[in-house]
Image (cartoon, helix red, strand yellow):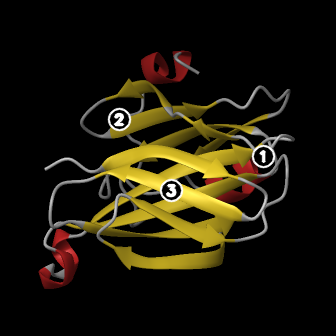
Amino acid sequence: MSFSLDKISYDGVSLTVTVFQEELTDFAFYVLLAGKKLDTKWYSLDTTSSLDISLLVGKTYSLILFFRPNAEKTIEEEKVVKKFFFKVNEDHSTKVFSNNILFESENFKITEYDQGSDITFVTFNSAHTDKTSSPFGGDFILSEGWNLISVQKDNRNQYQDLTWICLKVL
């Protein structure tokens, strides 16, 4: 199964999200700023869905997509959740930030989110998280326009396996 973001556009009034999704799949999304939910768009079978929302120029927002492969018949464990960061520019165009994986092993993942800032934060995820969890502090750090390098561990690993080789990537 394949589910992903195609594009995000904003005209100053409406945020439009277009996705790639398989037949019989519906999707919904949340828009967040600094980790606080601003608004929600409920599930739709269409590949494009819009939401009237006021977004600030220059801020980085989080977009959380929820895909249900069998629409309303999907149980909670079958949902596919994907998170993206995007910024609204002066001309209302949007830029989705890709995450650059600098290093990944069985127990760790080091990911860079570069917005071209002179300020970069390095964060380490906390207990009860894993390599797929949101970066610690990521919503706030990115919403302020700063860069982020996120070090994420496997749930039971307390960074013991993190070596100087991994840190040299930083």
Q: Secondary structure at mark 1?
A: loop
Q: Earlier in the sequence, mark 2 or mark 1?
A: 1
The image quadrant that residue 91 belongs to is: top right
Looking at the image, which residue is at 36% across and 38% down? Answer: 108
Looking at the image, which residue is at 54% across and 15% down? Answer: 168
Task: Check disc 2 and report the residue beneath it.
Answer: 161
Residue 163, position in %: x, y? 42, 25
Q: Secondary structure at mark 3?
A: strand
Give the residue type at disc 1: His
Give the residue type at disc 2: Asp
Residue 24, position in %: x, y? 15, 67
Q: Earlier in the sequence, mark 1 or mark 3?
A: 3
The circle drawn on residue 141 is: none
Classify mark 2: residues with Cα within 10 Å, few (<14), some (14-19) or many (20+): few
Q: Earlier in the sequence, mark 3 or mark 2?
A: 3
Give the residue type at disc 3: Val
Classify mark 1: residues with Cα within 10 Å, few (<14), some (14-19) or many (20+): some
Q: Could you tell me if the residues under marks 1 and 3 are in contact, i.e. CB atoms within 8 Å?
A: no
Task: Check disc 1 and report the residue beneath it.
Answer: 92
